Amino acid sequence: MKKRSYKLIWSEEFNADVLNSAIWSFEEGEVRNNEKQYYTKNRNKNCRITDGKLILEAHKEDYKGYQYTSSSIITKHKKEFLYGRIEVSAKLPQGKGIWPAIWMLGTNIDEIHWPLCGEIDIMENVGYDPNNVHGNIHTKAFNHNLETNKGAFIKNDTLHEKFHLYAIDWTEDQVDFYFNDTKYFSFYNDNNNDIKTWPFIQPHYLLINLAVGGFWGGKEGIDDSIFPQQYIIDFIKYYEIN
């Protein structure tokens, strides 16, 4: 098999004082998955750039009728991705009830809705299972509601102490999931390009969020003693694959 080569197309190094609003937007309020936080917009306490790193920070506090605050940033309507390699260097938060993620959704979600639009979960980690990194895909045919979603996990006991690289290689034929240099899961095109099984022939946008609770993150409750918790992103890079 021909060895892949990569050409850097775009990078986010977080060298400015604030997020680049031409690329990023904030989600606001209660958004999904029965999560317990209120996602705030342009609130330094929950999202800021410090020393070249993005910090998403979850707090236990009363805010607009919610008991927790946090942040979720997305590139919807601003920057989209179709094939290539996406890398994110991150240090994860920890504690029961925490649910950080790096993921992607089809840009046509508003027209055809989830899960037909497709979802690629580059990284998920839940606080009650702290040392496992999960990579998953969701489609109309393969999703957690049907208990048919496809994915895998890899174990590491320094996720909350060190920066690690979370990445996918996305081609017309497959999506490969990486933790640092280790490929731990692949999802393959069925070659029919049926949108129900392979919606990954269309652009997706990127989401990075720190959830509190929710159907998965809160499965074993929330430990209020852990807050505040920081989810730190060092960089994001997007490569063309040759």
Image: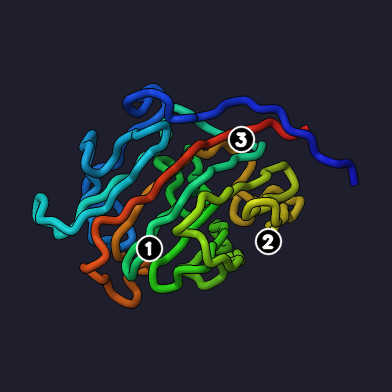
Q: Classify residue 3 as left or right of residue 147.
A: right
Residue wearing tag 1:
94
Binning the other alpha carbons within 10 Å of mark 2 as few (below 14), some (14 to 19) or many (20 upward) gives: some
Q: Which mark is residue 82?
A: 3
Q: Percent from the top left, x then y, of residue 18?
A: 32, 27
- Disc 3 residue type (three-letter): Leu
Residue at position x 21%, y 54% in the image: 59
- Disc 2 residue type (three-letter): Tyr
Specify the color scheme: rainbow
Query: How many angstroms separate mark 2 from mark 1 (CA)?
Result: 22 Å
Q: Percent from the top left, x then y, of residue 29?
A: 21, 47
Residue wearing tag 2:
184
Nearest the viewer among 111 and 35 is 35
Q: Which mark is residue 4?
A: none
Q: Earlier in the sequence, mark 1 or mark 3?
A: 3
Quadrant location of the C terminus? top right
Q: Secondary structure at mark 2?
A: strand
